[in-house]
């Protein structure tokens, strides 16, 4: 895999840390070598044509041009290879991320909500149930509008900018946005998807290496876009349990605002002009 590493380094890709990521790397690698071959092939052909059909050799123009069918065949093969890449590899790869979900009982479910200019992460807590969310309850200290009267939401965990997940377990993300179109991009996990206001977009990945990784916004979403970064921490199972416990204790020590708001600073949320946050969300399998 030395060529793969070379391409990765050349493109500035961070090392892959997800189960499916090597497939993405292979398709990126193949596309680049293929484009390299096309570049050299077409350049050589161009130079050949300049010399072969120079004015000195053909003083009178031939208006009929090429009679051989070779170029048609060549162009057709290029289109065919590109179609195979797209239909045979790229689309099925993507479909596995957004259609074929793992069993929910093994997976970590997270609601990810983008807003100008930060990422909110909402976990269901020990009961496995997400609390009800209501756009009318959104405040600076309750960025997702969690309903304080919903028992299912009492143990929910809401964090700003930092998501913890355990290693070697599938993570199912349900993505939405409170204001404009953002793009939830985890370069090390080789996954990205647009966060669109009014839509719930499911996707999943499985982290296979513990560590701290970057979460970025991949869509120019406003003046503060450059700063719309977060952190994905892939923990060992023990560290993950410790983190869950710590968040639960934090949530327990706060009375009002309710459990959903361990971090109360959210300078970007606006109390007036509330953006349309998505309401309670269905499972991605639904
Ligand atoms: Cu953004």
Image (spheres, grey):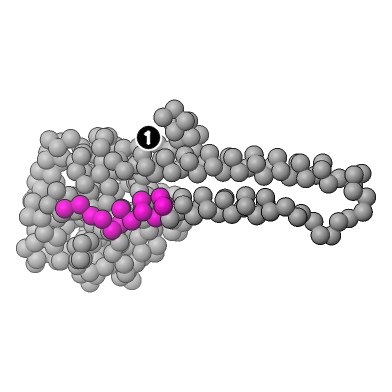
Find the magenta span and give its range. 88-103
Q: Is mark 1 within 8 Å of ligand 1?
A: no
Identify whether 76 is placed above or below 198: above
Camera-side residue: 142 or 286?
A: 286
Quarter of the image that includes the N terminus: top left
Q: Quadrant of residue 182?
A: bottom left
Camera-side residue: 13 or 106?
A: 106
Magenta segment's dominant SS is: helix
Residue at the image position 26 percent from the left and 35 percent from the top: 209
Residue 53 horizontal/vertical position (percent):
83, 46
Q: Is residue 207 visible?
A: yes
Residue 106 horizontal/vertical position (percent):
14, 48
Q: Is residue 102 magenta?
A: yes
With 198 as the anchor, is 25 left or right in this view? Answer: right
Q: Is residue 173 visible?
A: no
Residue 13 horizontal/vertical position (percent):
43, 38
Camera-side residue: 50 or 178?
A: 50
Residue at the image position 28 percent from the left and 58 percent from the top: 99
Q: Is residue 177 magenta?
A: no
Q: Quadrant of residue 115?
A: bottom left
Q: Quadrant of residue 44?
A: top right
Secondary structure category for the residue under label 1 = loop
Residue indicated by mark 1 = 15
Identify whether 41 is placed above or below 89: above
With 118 as the anchor, is 167 left or right in this view? Answer: left
Camera-side residue: 98 or 62?
A: 62
Residue at the image position 62 percent from the left and 52 percent from the top: 73
With 2 as the anchor, is 197 left or right in this view? Answer: left
């Amino acid at each position: 895999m030395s060529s793969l590493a070379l391409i990765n380094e050349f493109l500035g890709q961070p090392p892959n840390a997800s189960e499916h990521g090597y497939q993405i790397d292979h398709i990126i690698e193949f596309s680049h070598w293929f484009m390299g071959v096309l570049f050299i092939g077409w350049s050589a052909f161009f130079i050949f044509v300049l010399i072969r059909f120079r004015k000195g050799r053909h003083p009178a123009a031939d208006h009929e041009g090429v009679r051989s069918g070779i170029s048609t065949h060549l162009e057709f093969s290029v289109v065919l290879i590109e179609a195979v890449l797209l239909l045979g590899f790229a689309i099925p790869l993507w479909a596995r991320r957004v259609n074929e979900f793992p069993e929910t009982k093994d997976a970590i479910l997270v609601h990810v909500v983008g807003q100008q200019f930060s990422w909110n992460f909402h976990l269901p807590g020990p009961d496995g149930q997400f609390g009800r969310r209501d756009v009318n309850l959104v405040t600076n200290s309750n960025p997702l509008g969690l309903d304080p009267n919903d028992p299912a939401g009492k143990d929910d965990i809401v964090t700003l900018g930092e998501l913890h997940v355990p290693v070697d377990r599938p993570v199912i993300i349900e993505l939405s946005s409170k204001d404009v179109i953002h793009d939830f991009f985890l370069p090390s996990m080789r996954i990205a998807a647009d966060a669109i206001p009014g839509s719930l977009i499911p996707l999943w990945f499985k982290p296979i290496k513990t560590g701290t990784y970057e979460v970025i916004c991949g869509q120019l979403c406003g003046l503060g876009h450059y700063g719309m970064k977060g952190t994905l921490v892939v923990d060992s199972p023990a560290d993950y349990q410790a983190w869950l416990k710590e968040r639960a204790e934090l949530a327990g020590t706060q009375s009002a605002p309710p459990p959903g708001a361990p971090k109360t600073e959210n300078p970007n949320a606006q109390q007036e002009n509330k953006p349309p946050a998505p309401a309670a969300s269905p499972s991605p399998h639904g």
